[in-house]
Amino acid sequence: MAGVGQLRGETMRLILLGPPGVGKGTQAQFLMDRLGAIQLSTGDLLRAAVREGTELGKDAKRYMDAGELVPDDVILGLIGEKMTELKDQAVIFDGFPRTVAQAEGLDKLMGELGQEINNALELVVDDQVVIDRLSSRRSCPQCGAVFNLISAPPKVENVCDTCGHVGLIQRDDDKPDVIANRLRVYHEQTAPVADYYRGKGNLVQTDGLGTVDEVRGRVFEALSL
Ligand code: AMP
């Protein structure tokens, strides 16, 4: 049976925009289930490359540790490879595009592959919410699962719900001075990406404040799912 992602005879390709820590990854999980889609998170792809110790991972780590963006050509190369593999699969882009140059690169790639972006959904919250959420975020160094000590703690303290690994960690880039830099980079380089999609008439915005379920309800409503 076709998933919702294919119901209108087209494959759903959705971009999730919003500052770091707004909950893009969490909402992407719900959308994946609903749409039968794959989540494509450039942050996850980069962290996997860092864990594997590849050349790309070693290069990317310097930028990531400082809260700076990895160069556009590296990111577009990663996405190009994945999109060529995925073909007609519905896709949720999480954490990409982060610059207008990446958005333009994605359009070019989509044109070459005969694919299209349906919507860009922006989750909107204040900077202070981002700071609070990122400071209480913990993740599993083994499988990458993400928890929030306040809103979504693991069932057993310090143990990963997904893979059972003991010892959740705070990502280096979730430490206070790096968070401040990530926010600055977000406002300078990524906020214009929302304007880019607004200009094309496919930006949808929704309030990212509230519980995970409240935000999920708003996201589904905004996308008429
Ligand atoms: P994230 O988990 O999406 O917040 O990404 C963590 C870090 O990976 C970012 O702070 C950047 O250093 C890097 N990164 C992830 N996605 C991108 C992207 N699309 N463009 C440039 N850098 C990225």
Image (tube, rainbow, N blue to C red):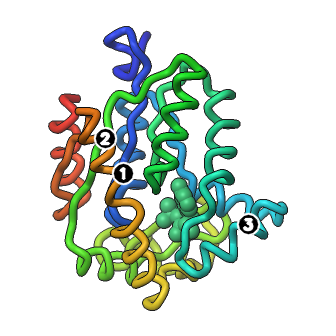
Residue underneath mark 1: 193
Residues at badges 3 and 2 in contact (C-beta under 8 Å)?
Answer: no
Question: In terms of depth relative to the viewer, which is nearer, 217 or 111?
Answer: 111
Name the one closer to the observer, 43 or 103. Answer: 103
Q: Earlier in the sequence, mark 3 or mark 2?
A: 3
Where in the image, quadrant-wise, is ligand 1 located? bottom right
Say what secondary structure mark 2 lies in: helix
Does the closest atom of ligand 1 sit within 8 Å of the Cβ of label 1?
no
Instruction: Tell me the quarter of the image containing the N terminus.
Output: top left
Q: CA distance from mark 3 to mark 1?
A: 26 Å
Q: Position of residue 56 (x, y in %)?
A: 77, 60
Q: Nearer the viewer, mark 3 or mark 1?
A: 1
The spot of residue 220 in percent (x, y) is 22, 38
Residue position marked by numbered label 3 in the rendering: 50
Amino acid carrying label 2: it is: Tyr
* Residues at circles 2 and 1 in contact by the CB criterion of under 8 Å: yes
* Residue name at image x 62 percent, y 45 percent: 76
Label 3 – label 2 distance at C-alpha: 31 Å
Q: Residues within 10 Å of mark 2 (few under 14, many from 20)?
A: some
Does residue 160 appear anywhere in the picture? no
Real-space CA distance between mark 2 and mark 1, rounded to the nearest whole angstrom: 7 Å
Task: Indicate yes or no: mark 2 CB to ligand 1 under 8 Å.
Answer: no
The residue to which callout 2 is attached is 197
Tell me the residue at 24%/48% (across/down).
216
In this rendering, the answer to whether 80 lies above or below 55 is above
Q: State the residue at coordinates (69%, 72%).
A: 61
Amino acid at pointer 3? Val
Q: Secondary structure at mark 3?
A: helix
Residue 216, placed above or below residue 60: above
Q: Is 49 placed above or below 112 here? A: below
